[in-house]
Image (cartoon, rainbow, N blue to C red):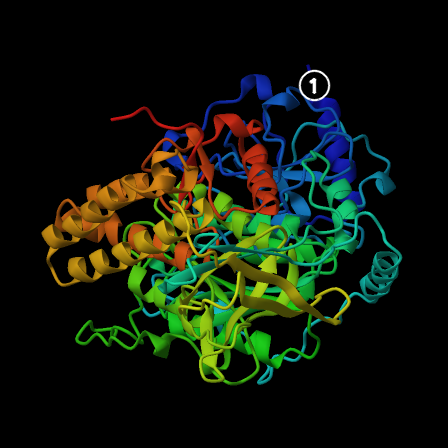
Amino acid sequence: MIDLKEMGSKWRKAKLALGINMCLHVPQTLEHDSSPSPSRFSDAVSLSPASALSRGSTTSTPSSSGLRLSKSGTKSSKLQSTCAICLTAMKPGHGHAIFTAECSHSFHFHCITSNVKHGNQSCPVCRAKWKEVPFQNPAYDISHGRQRINAVGWPQDDAWMTVLRRLPPARLDANRHISSLYHAQEPPIFNDDETLDQQHEIAERNVSIKDDVGDPDSVGTIEVKTYPEVLAVSRSACHDNFTVLIHLKAPVTSRRHINSSDHTELLQVSENSRTPVDLVTVLDVSGSMAGTKLALLKRAMGFVIQNLGPSDRLSVIAFSSTARRLFPLRRMTEAGRQEALQAVNSLISNGGTNIAEGLRKGAKVIVDRKWKNSVASIILLSDGQDTYTVTSPSGTHRRKDYKSLLPISIHQNGGTGFHIPVHSFGFGADHDATSMHSISEISGGTFSFIEAEGVIQDAFAQCIGGLLSVVVQELQVQVECVHRSLHIGSIKAGSYRTSIIGNARMGTVDVGDLYAEEERDFLVTINIPVDRSIDQMSLLKVDCVYRDPITKDAVTLEGASQVKIQRPEIIGAQVVSMEVDRQRNRLHAAEAMAEARVAAENGDLARAVCVLERCYKSLSETASTESGDRLCVALCAELKEMQERMANRQIYEASGRAYVLSGLSSHSWQRATARGDSTDSTSLLQAYQTPSMVDMVTRSQTMLLGNPSSHRKLQQALSFPAARPQPR
């Protein structure tokens, strides 16, 4: 039991030493604590990356807030173990003062005072309005991230103290609907970005030298394979629309992320073996984001910040009725992370939804930057409808030109030299899926549908898992006919830009960036004529040209693969390539989804369901599906899921539209997107997901609950069942 008289004496000495000229109190010990009122808590209480937040409470006379000097206080096991602002441990004995608010949530004192300094006067976790806020006393030293406590010679095992400023009664101001955060001045040009990490540049050169001498962990080159539809065509027969599959697989990073509970070790292992990123997050903080949504967003952003390395740079744009840059592009060193976490946790929600202004500011950060990391991207999250550009604030008109939401400077085909994909995340049931999908499609990014709010961190984790593993940039695939009588009929490449030139004897696919071990499949059709003069025919030659993002060198793979078929006089029954058949099924399914979506938007849900069912039956009868091919079985399951989400107009408006658009985004770019949790994903293997994405999602789930197997996994735009289903 703590001696209250002795403790009071120590506090009096401490007050004199620190020069605190204010009223202090010594709360009762924890044994006499009373539980806080249930109304203090919300669903956002347990949002720390720690497994769960235990609630420590204090009595409320004369104040229910306090600052704990942590070392070995009584019943410390009852306290939450992680600061919800900086996401680091609040460990006893580390000399950090810990502030516990009247709502019972605890934070490092230097974190919460910085939060208050940014204008926040409510709990970053549960959003409870505080009657008293902590402030930083002049004697408080944060030069090394902790308080000057030992200097005054007092023990650190005292129970609780209060360093508070009581707030005046709130003034009602109907016009003050936007945070003071938005009123600070910004420079006219965003060229105040932090310089790049010079040590990383040196490390990149060293990695390049190692790779040149045959390092077994070197990045390597793109793997290119080709598959003809059949292996032989009779000399006396022609074959129209003969299909050739071009399969690409990106190389492995020199050291792929490993699963480790030691975050520092993980960064040290991988930091010098990958390309650093310039990331801008554009976050909706309108009034509809209040409460749990904003708390979940802050937690997800905390995960992103903690998993960026010191060579990566981050800038955050917050938007509601207007937009504001919270801080310029700065490196995520330890100090950079702390400032970023504090800025994000200072956000409050209010106002309308001006997506266009948020994107304009985000694009300006990228375009105006003085220094440039090789990889740059924008992450956009919103839970609502744009009320300024697409829809007027009064709701009187709605424009269909979604290109107006995206600055021309980052259009994929804008001609400005910038290629900055916007990966958009529609949050909840009320977001404008059509706008978000259009933004991503125009810029070359992906659209994810976060139906279950709790998976927002996993969705962000998957995205940055890819962005932090880019191994190929500016990839262009070049296809050329070899035999003089051949011509290219078509190149089916989803949303990737294609061209057919040179009297249809050459074609290109502009692929762009690839993540480590990411795969792409393109189908090329040609017409094979009768030719009785040869026994073998060379059809196509495939070349690849790209840039290595680490060495910045251009890489050319000439004759990476060549397709040949036999031309005998007589042939037997031909077996269609399983690889070609499964990719035909993927394209067929994507086309059916797009057609069904058009029908649904026109109000004909019955026809939409019919289109999906017809495609389902067609795919079920193909050789690859009948053989149990996992991709094709999963496509069939996806088509059934979409039919259910088009059962009626209410279901379609609530989730069907976003679900379909996220699936189309995934298939058109052949890249993983997150959406919904409508089926039991514990038995599904994710599609388009790379090993780096899997690692990052696993880390997110481990951070949340400590055991990824017990956490609801993300469902991707397309999923592979773990086992072949039983025959119907």
| Image-based side of 490 in relation to 282, left or right | left
Q: Residue at x 58, y 75 (%)?
A: 365
Whole-percent x and y of residue 721? 41, 33
| Image-based side of 636 in relation to 442, left or right | left
Residue 677 in sight from this viewpoint: no
Whole-percent x and y of residue 451? 34, 45
Of residues 487 and 470, the one drawn nearer to the viewer in this rendering:
487
Q: Residue at x 58, y 79 (%)?
A: 367
Above or below: residue 75 compared with residue 641: above
Above or below: residue 420 compared with residue 340: below
Residue 192 in sight from this viewpoint: yes
Task: Please state the total of marks drawn on the protein image.
Answer: 1
Of residues 524 and 617, the one drawn nearer to the viewer in this rendering:
524
Whole-percent x and y of residue 628? 39, 33
Above or below: residue 190 compared with residue 140: below
Q: Residues within 10 Å of mark 1 (few under 14, many from 20)?
A: some
| Image-based side of 90 in relation to 704, left or right | right
Farthest residue toward the top? 1
Q: Residue at x 74, y 57 (%)?
A: 310
Residue 143, image quadrant: bottom right
Of residues 132 and 579, the one drawn nearer to the viewer in this rendering:
579
Element assignment for label 1: loop
For label 1, the residue is 2
Residue 349, image quadrant: bottom left
Quadrant of the image containing the C terminus = top left
- Kind of residue at badge 1: Ile
Whole-percent x and y of residue 406? 41, 75
Quadrant of the image containing the N terminus = top right
Q: Residue at x 57, y 85 (%)?
A: 188
